[in-house]
Image (tube, grey):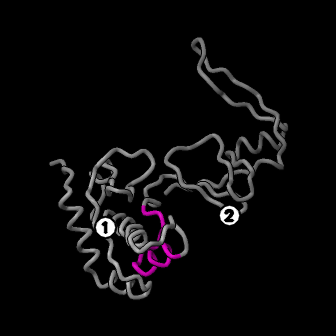
Amino acid sequence: MRRKVSKSRVERICREILASKKWAKMKAKMGFPKDPTIRPVKFKRLKRSLALAGPHLTINRDYYLRVQNKDLKHTLTHELVHYYLDDNGINESHGKRFKQCCSAMGLNRVYAHEADYKYKFTCTCGWWLKVNRIHFEVHCQKCHKVMVSPTTYAEIKKKGEFTRRLQFQKGKFVTTTYEASPENYVPWNKKVN
């Protein structure tokens, strides 16, 4: 039997979170008196998010239909922390206070959906990115180098250039060769979750 979306289920879980001892401890630790108001719930297909905290609590419909209760509770706690800070006059996205609240609530990740990704690409400088599909190249946000596959990196190091199939034209792939200096590229370390 296929599960249906249920606004009342989401609202019930939100009320459970707000009534929990962890929430009371977090509230006492942070010192902001006002509990968040539970916003109206909407289900929508979101491209990049599991849920959005705005005028409505918007939940990714596909995520809701496949997720387990504990993961949904984690996501809703994350969104309620956003509402808690916003209702108490703190306007920050994932800043210091938000992380303190998440830590006090026992959330070990700021982004609730980190575990949902298939691949984790790690740069040599330590920066990482989680994705669901393999990209040809990933730009490191820390050292600003381009992470490429170890095979492509070996080609760059050996020849100072690499070849890439770009587009499908007239029944075949068109390949293009790019010049590249090895100091601007690093091989990624790919792990499968």
Q: Residue at x 43, y 59 (%)?
A: 113
The answer to whether mark 1 and mark 2 are in CB contact below 8 A is no
Relative height, residue 59 to residue 38 (above, below): above
Whether residue 107 is in magenta: the answer is: yes
* Closer to the camera in the image, 106 or 182: 106
Relative height, residue 101 to residue 43 (above, below): below
Q: Residue at x 40, y 71 (%)?
A: 81
Number of other residues with Cα within 10 Å of mark 2, as a class: few under 14, some 14 to 19, many 20 or more: few
Check disc 1 and give the amino acid type.
Lys
Mark drawn on residue 126: 2
Quarter of image, res 15: bottom left
Quarter of image, res 54: bottom left
| Element marked by disc 2 | loop
Check disc 2 and give the amino acid type.
Gly
Image check: 83 left or right of 124?
left
| Element marked by disc 1 | helix
Where's residue 40, x and y in %?
26, 58
Q: Which residues are magenta?
A: 97-112
Number of other residues with Cα within 10 Å of mark 1, as a class: few under 14, some 14 to 19, many 20 or more: some
Image check: 172 left or right of 175?
left
Q: What residue is pinned by disc 1?
A: 73
* Closer to the camera in the image, 119 or 73: 73
Q: Residue at x 44, y 60 (%)?
A: 115
Quarter of image, res 31: bottom left
Where's residue 137, x and y in %?
66, 43
Query: Which residue in the rendered view is the most extreme toward the front?
Result: 89
